[in-house]
Amino acid sequence: MLVASFSDLVGQRTLITSSHRYMGPAIAEAFRTVGADVVADERPLVAADAPQQLIDDVSAGGDIDVLVANLGVPAVVVPITEMDDADWLSMYDELVHPLMRLCRAALPRMIERGRGAIVAVTSSSPLRPIRNASAYASARAAQNALITSIGVDVERHGVRVNAIAQNYIANPTYYPPELTATERFQTHLARSVPAGRLGTPDETAQLALFLASAASGFFAGRIIPLDGGWSA
């Protein structure tokens, strides 16, 4: 029997975007714990040239072995009949375009070297209807489709690209304590999530380690739900 190990991540240069928010802190800590060479970056990535500049800056200190594209912003929640262009476009400017540009910038060198991994933290929200969240859910769906397509394109080059499609994971961006402590939310949680609880950022971080490691060598363009069964 083979037992998964993250020893292959020791010394691996790992870039984590938006490391100060969403899943960034937990993922950065997990990679440091297993001995990866972590570059935790906090810069905004909305500007068209920002992702390329980030990859160039980090690569100047050594090739990037693992890119964790951690992108999360508060969802626009508004009925489609009241949606304006700014609300709609903001979800794509924050979530979709930076992910494409990060992959576009990081992949050439990974392909040239014949190894590397990209792990995107996305969402399972497109897998099940959510009221009045059309902009957010469609942007997350675009992320998932992008990762699927890129993943199967680059697998033959020895590069793995996969995504963690999460929901109901405790974090201040989507599930702040002032929300989760309410009786209404707890009732909703018990009714909607088969696991009956919120997931933890550490659970996301452990899955990120797996997808970045050689243990996930047979995964290509996979969108892995992590939501306590909510999207099942």
Image (cartoon, rainbow, N blue to C red):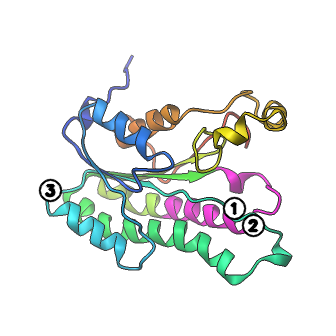
Q: Which mark is residue 137?
A: 1
Q: Is residue 16 left or right of residue 176?
A: left
7 is higher (above) or lower (below) than 133 = above
Inspect the magenta stretch and tell me whether residue 108 lies in it.
no
Q: Is residue 40 left or right of residue 144?
A: left
- What amino acid is at disc 2? Ser
Which amino acid lies under the numbered mark 1 shown in the image of this protein?
Ala
> Magenta region: which residues?
124-149
**2 and 1 marks in contact (CB < 8 Å):** yes
Residue drawn at x 25%, y 51% is: 65
> Which callout, 2 or 3, points at the residue further toward the start of the chain?
3
Q: Which residue is mark 2?
A: 134
Residue that badge 3 annotates: 62
Percent of width and height locating residue 177: 65, 38
In space, the residues marked 2 and 3 are separated at their CA atoms by 40 Å
Residue drawn at point x = 48 percent, y = 32 percent: 202
In the image, residue 136 lies in the stretch drawn in magenta: yes
Q: Residue 136, how many percent across, how many down?
A: 67, 64
